[in-house]
Amino acid sequence: MQLSTLLLSALGATAVYAAPAFPDLNVAAASPEGIETMSEYFTMLAQKVQQSRQMAAAPVCDLSKAVLPEAPNPLPPVSAGLTLKHVAIGRGTQNYTCDLKNATAVPKANGAVATLFNASCIVATYPDLAKMLGRVSMQFSLTQSEASKKLAPSNLIISGKHWFTNPTTPFFDLDSPTQQLGGVPCTKAADVAAPADAPVGQLGEPAVRWLKLTAVAGATGGLQEVYRVETVGGSAPATCKGMPATFEVQYATQYWFYAQ
């Protein structure tokens, strides 16, 4: 992939499944923190463009150069014999339920739904810029239909979808119009707390935990392991006080997919 294409993928606004339609800027983006996040992202992007002008040749999109982020308390390593097949930015909601008869009850996780955006080349070439994508995307609301949703303010193309097939089985579908990478139902193998400085969500909620997931029966495309890292927001409140029976909390993350 040429450098100009790579950087444009982190700047423009097109969709894979439908005509362009920007998500709404969230009110939080008008806060000092939101403005700072947006400014930091575009400053970093401008620096990358400037640096590219001094390069003799454009960098190559080489996933073997990508390094899986680690939390202070690291997740178990990738199993021997597996190689990185895809990296996606996931943008969607963590879903929860509450017992309305018990305000002190802890909300229960009820799966998640997310659109996956192809970030493989950005992660492999500009990991610092990739890390910013989840954070800056939280400055925009998920108000568009599933078909026209985009990872504002980027131009990353949709590479798949994420949902739960039952309360305990997350599923990732990486078959899209641009590539056929397979699908993988998973079970949780390990989880660790997000770093203390992980970006909070739109309502100030902490980042959800980092995960290692392993494939269960039904996986295709050789997909075996999935890591959820660089999480942004998504955590439920401590109790159900004032909450409805079901609710969603927006989140962003990086998903790293490993295959045989």
Image (cartoon, helix red, strand yellow):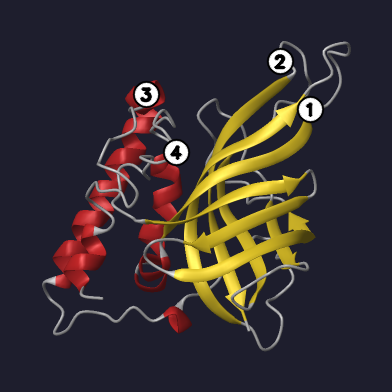
Q: Distance between the residues labelled 1 and 2?
A: 9 Å
The picture places residue 197, in percent across and down from the top left corner, at: 57, 46
Question: Residue shown at 30%/43% (left/top)?
Answer: 153
Residue at numbered disc 4: 146
Distance Cα–Cα, label 2 vs label 3: 25 Å
The amino acid pointed to by label 3 is Ser
- Marks 3 and 4, how far apart in space? 27 Å
Question: What element does badge 3 sit on?
Answer: loop
In the rendered image, which residue does mark 1 sit on?
107
Q: Distance between the residues labelled 1 and 3?
A: 28 Å
Q: In this view, does 3 lie to the left or right of 41?
A: left
Q: Which of marks 4 and 2 is nearer the N terminus?
A: 4
Amino acid type at circle 2 is Met
**Going by the image, does 26 lie left or right of 237?**
left
Reply above or below: 252 against 59: above
Identify the secondary structure beneath mark 2.
loop
Disc 1 + disc 3, Cβ < 8 Å: no
Q: Mark 2 points at which residue?
A: 243
Residue occupying image coordinates x 26% and y 76% = 1
Q: What's the distance in space between the residues labelled 4 and 2, CA to CA?
A: 25 Å
Contact flag, marks 4 and 1 (Cβ < 8 Å): no
Question: Which tag is nearer the camera, tag 4 or tag 2?
Answer: 4
Q: Residues within 10 Å of mark 3 (few under 14, many from 20)?
A: few
Q: Mark 3 points at which residue?
A: 31
Dot 4: element: loop
Residue 219 figure quarter: bottom right
**Residue 34 appearing in the image:** yes
Q: Can residue 73 be seen in this view?
A: no
Task: Between residue 77 and residue 175, name the one nearer to us.
Answer: 175
Mark carried by residue 177: none
